[in-house]
């Protein structure tokens, strides 16, 4: 019997929403749904979070997705095309690119390995050359040993000189060779460093060598129309079938290529979360002198290592946390008395009654053969995809097997591992879903074990009180070849533990219905026909997700602030108007998001009491309904780059000031004077009169606005009085964009081009004589 071919759909990444950390990806897949309603959609990355996958059908309200399960399949590659190593391209080959030709990840790995061996060989040659130099440099003339009876001999000076000349000539050649080897070693080290850096920056959207890994989503559809016979109707009155012979047997063409299986073409949207994506805002501010408007271009620096390249996708940026809590706190009442509110349901359902008798016919057929035969297939362990259909909170078990013919057992002892067959005269087992039968009285016939099991036991989720002892006694009897009597069972089994009050509390893994696996008849013991948590998570996928999260530790660009730190109490989403490309290489890439009009005007600020320097500033006004996060801003004045400053967070309708640095075209000078005197009838009040004189000079060719900041003392003593004598204003009256310290006073002056002005101010401090300090009233 031929098996149905699995329907596979390819998918395309359409949009990505990058959050403060992590991203929400949106894929689209189009195809024809087969009559069985099961389709596999491929193309997902290895770092996908299986618990975040969601699927829905677009444009077909009658069809819905009832199951979405992530599956990973890794298998050896059938045929690997040898990817040649790209040679460095000269500048004449490509006038725009002067480096090497593009390489794939596998080519880069091979290139790095080749350069590593070349670097090691160059280092060995250099070390060997140094050994030769040390060996030649160690040559010395050694005179022969002289006997005591021999007379003294003259030293052969010519031989010494010839040896020294030989050593010098040899060392000169070896040192010249050593210089060439050092240069070769430096070149090899440089090429190895460049290749290693290119490999580190390469995209991770590439299959592992020699292994093909496919991450797919298995979808189950509901509401698919039944196949319709499209043959032309036959006129039963005349029996005229010849006119319709050409139309007989016509059928719809299906998307998966199967004949005679019409389907419905739908479009499916997949959403899933991936770690390893971060973003920070950056800006570019352009304005012209004398204008009250400016253009602020919002750009985003995005870095991602999710395992898939974002090519031609719609980018959106969100300041929210992708994993934040969304549950609301609930305040429960304190009740005094016996009657208490019913506990919340735990999500646990007791297994159906009669589950132990579901496989009675399977056990009566005897043990499975060692090898499968043509007449009787070998029983296999059921998989989740064979019998399990995940819905809201229930899992449908497999139908009971058909009853098999029961033969009389052969005489002799029953092996311990063989199941106990039912006698022919035994009554039919209890059907699946029937009402539970009462337990047999002591000494009477026993019934199968109850279906429930406790969460901590290996039997399943929960158990009725006393069920554990009954199961142990039944299993002991099965190993002995007969069912034990009630007194023997009660004597052999320990007393049952006291049941815990309230409903069972299963763990989170037991309540994850999508990951539960239905054990088939091949499982022995209490696992048969029950749901248990599936296999452990994929360690390779967990490693991919761990490497992807390392992007969060990338160093930020200058003046950059992470979105969650600058957003504060609000969340906002920015949508890019055009599609963009962001490779999965773990480095920063800039994407233009939007252009925001801002109201601005240039002002100069000086605090002469701290520093006699005038600073240029820009006062920004956000008149839009979109917030601006803190980040670096490149300021361009009259199409000329000025500097990169730090933009503070600017809420809708907010006004903030950014500094542009000192302006040498405006000079400021400050002089102060203090006069001390007494006042009152008995001269019992000390008067400290302070005068401040500030001069400003504008040497720029255009008029400017200068804000001068001064301060006056602040007192908390009711007897000390401070009288101001100046025309300055307080920040509350001025209504500026900043918060000022208490006692701050402001002058706002309009200076024409080349003009000067003088500002005079002052204040008096009146202190009673009893509260004055001797020698403590001097002020600078």
Image (cartoon, rainbow, N blue to C red):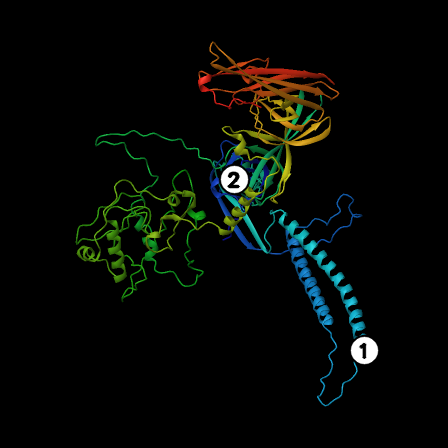
Left or right: 77 in relation to 97: left
Residue toward you, 541 or 224 = 541
Left or right: 589 in relation to 94: left
The percent position of residue 458, horizontal first and vertical second, equals: 33, 52
Instruction: Note whether 358 is above or below 665 in the view shown.
Output: below
The percent position of residue 340, horizontal first and vertical second, equals: 25, 32
Is disc 1 placed on a helix, strand or loop?
Answer: helix
On the question of residue 687 being in view, the answer is yes
Instruction: Note whether 32 is above or below 429 in the view shown.
Output: above
- Total labels: the figure holds 2
Residue at the farthest bottom position: 149
Instruction: Tell me the mark number nearer the camera, choosing from 2 and 1.
Output: 1
Is disc 2 placed on a helix, strand or loop?
Answer: strand
Residue 157, numbered label: 1
Residue toward you, 179 or 383 = 179
**Which quadrant would residue 279 be assigned to in this image?**
top right
Question: Quadrant where the C terminus lies?
Answer: top right
Mark 2 and mark 1: Cα distance apart in space:
87 Å
Residue drawn at x 34%, y 60% as measured from the top left:
366
Classed neighbour count for the residue bearing mark 2: other residues with Cα under 10 Å, few (<14), some (14–19), many (≥20): many
**Which quadrant would residue 133 be assigned to in this image?**
bottom right
Left or right: 684 in relation to 736: left
Left or right: 694 in relation to 165: left
On the image, numbered disc 2 is attached to which residue? 273
Q: Earlier in the sequence, mark 2 or mark 1?
A: 1
Residue drawn at x 41%, y 56% as measured from the top left:
379
Residue 504, numbered label: none
The percent position of residue 237, horizontal first and vertical second, equals: 52, 34
The percent position of residue 745, horizontal first and vertical second, equals: 57, 18
Classed neighbour count for the residue bearing mark 1: other residues with Cα under 10 Å, few (<14), some (14–19), many (≥20): few
Instruction: Note whether 447 is above or below 679 in the view shown.
Output: below
């Amino acid at each position: 019997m031929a098996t149905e071919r699995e329907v596979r759909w390819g998918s395309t990444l359409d949009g990505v929403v990058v959050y403060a950390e992590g991203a929400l990806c949106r894929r689209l897949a189009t195809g024809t749904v087969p009559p069985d309603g099961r389709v596999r959609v491929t193309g997902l990355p290895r770092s996908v979070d299986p618990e975040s996958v969601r699927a829905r059908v677009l444009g077909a309200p009658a069809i819905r997705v009832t199951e979405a399960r992530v599956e990973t399949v890794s298998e050896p590659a059938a045929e690997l095309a040898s990817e040649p190593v790209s040679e460095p391209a000269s500048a004449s080959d490509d006038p725009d690119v002067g480096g090497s030709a593009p390489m794939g990840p596998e080519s880069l790995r091979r290139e790095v390995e080749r350069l590593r061996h070349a670097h090691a060989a160059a280092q060995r040659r250099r070390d060997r050359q140094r050994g030769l130099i040390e060996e030649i440099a160690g040559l010395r003339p050694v005179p022969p040993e002289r006997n005591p009876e021999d007379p003294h001999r003259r030293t052969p000076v010519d031989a010494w000189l010839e040896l020294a000349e030989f050593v010098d000539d040899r060392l000169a050649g070896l040192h010249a060779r050593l210089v060439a080897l050092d240069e070769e070693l430096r070149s090899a080290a440089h090429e190895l460093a460049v290749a290693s850096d290119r490999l580190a920056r390469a995209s991770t959207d590439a299959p592992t060598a020699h292994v093909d890994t496919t991450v797919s989503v298995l979808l189950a559809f509901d509401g698919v129309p039944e196949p319709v016979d499209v043959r032309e109707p036959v006129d039963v009155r005349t029996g005229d079938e010849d006119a319709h012979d050409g139309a007989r047997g016509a059928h719809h063409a299906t998307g998966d290529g199967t004949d005679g299986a019409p389907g419905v073409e739908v479009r499916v949207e997949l959403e899933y979360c991936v770690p390893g994506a971060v973003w920070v805002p950056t800006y570019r501010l352009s304005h012209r002198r004398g204008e009250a408007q400016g253009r602020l271009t919002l750009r985003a620096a995005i870095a991602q290592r999710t395992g898939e390249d974002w090519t031609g996708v719609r980018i959106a940026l969100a300041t929210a946390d992708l994993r934040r809590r969304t549950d609301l706190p609930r305040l429960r009442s304190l009740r005094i008395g016996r009657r208490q509110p019913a506990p919340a349901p735990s999500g646990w359902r007791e297994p159906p009654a009669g589950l132990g008798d579901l496989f009675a016919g399977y056990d009566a057929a005897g043990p499975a053969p060692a090898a499968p035969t043509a007449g009787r297939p070998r029983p296999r362990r059921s998989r989740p995809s064979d019998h399990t259909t995940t819905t809201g909170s229930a899992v449908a078990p497999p139908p009971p097997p058909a009853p098999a013919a029961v033969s009389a057992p052969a005489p002799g002892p029953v092996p311990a591992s063989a199941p106990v067959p039912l006698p022919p005269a035994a009554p039919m087992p209890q059907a699946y879903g029937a009402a539970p039968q009462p337990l047999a009285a002591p000494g009477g016939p026993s019934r199968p074990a109850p279906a429930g099991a406790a969460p901590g036991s290996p039997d399943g989720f929960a158990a009725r009180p006393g069920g554990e002892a009954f199961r142990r006694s039944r299993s002991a009897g099965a190993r002995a070849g007969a069912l034990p009597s009630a007194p023997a069972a009660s004597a052999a089994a320990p007393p049952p533990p006291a049941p815990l009050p309230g409903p069972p509390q299963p763990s989170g893994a037991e309540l994850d219905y999508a990951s539960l696996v239905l054990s088939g008849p091949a499982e022995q013991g209490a696992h048969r026909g029950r749901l248990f948590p599936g296999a452990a998570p994929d360690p390779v996928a967990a490693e991919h997700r761990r490497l992807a999260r390392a992007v969060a530790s990338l160093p930020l660009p200058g003046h950059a602030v992470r979105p969650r730190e600058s957003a504060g109490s609000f969340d906002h989403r920015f949508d890019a108007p055009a599609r963009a490309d962001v490779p999965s290489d773990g480095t920063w890439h800039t994407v233009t998001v939007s252009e925001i009009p801002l109201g601005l005007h240039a002002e100069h600020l000086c605090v002469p009491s701290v520093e006699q320097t005038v600073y240029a500033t820009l006062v920004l006004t956000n008149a839009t309904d979109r917030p601006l996060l803190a980040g670096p801003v490149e300021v361009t004045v009259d199409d000329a780059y000025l500097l990169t400053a730090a933009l503070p967070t600017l809420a809708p309708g907010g006004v903030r000031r950014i500094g542009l640095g000192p302006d040498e075209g405006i000079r400021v000078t400050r002089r102060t004077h203090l006069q001390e005197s007494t006042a009152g009838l008995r001269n019992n009040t000390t008067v400290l009169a302070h005068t401040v004189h500030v001069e400003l000079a504008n040497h720029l060719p255009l008029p400017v606005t200068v804000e001068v900041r001064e301060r006056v003392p602040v007192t908390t003593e009711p007897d000390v009085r401070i009288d101001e004598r100046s025309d300055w204003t307080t920040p509350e009256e001025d209504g500026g964009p900043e918060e000022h310290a208490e006692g701050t006073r402001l002058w706002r002056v309009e200076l024409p081009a080349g003009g000067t002005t003088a500002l005079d101010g002052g204040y008096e401090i009146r202190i009673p004589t009893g509260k004055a300090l001797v020698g403590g009233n001097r002020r600078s």
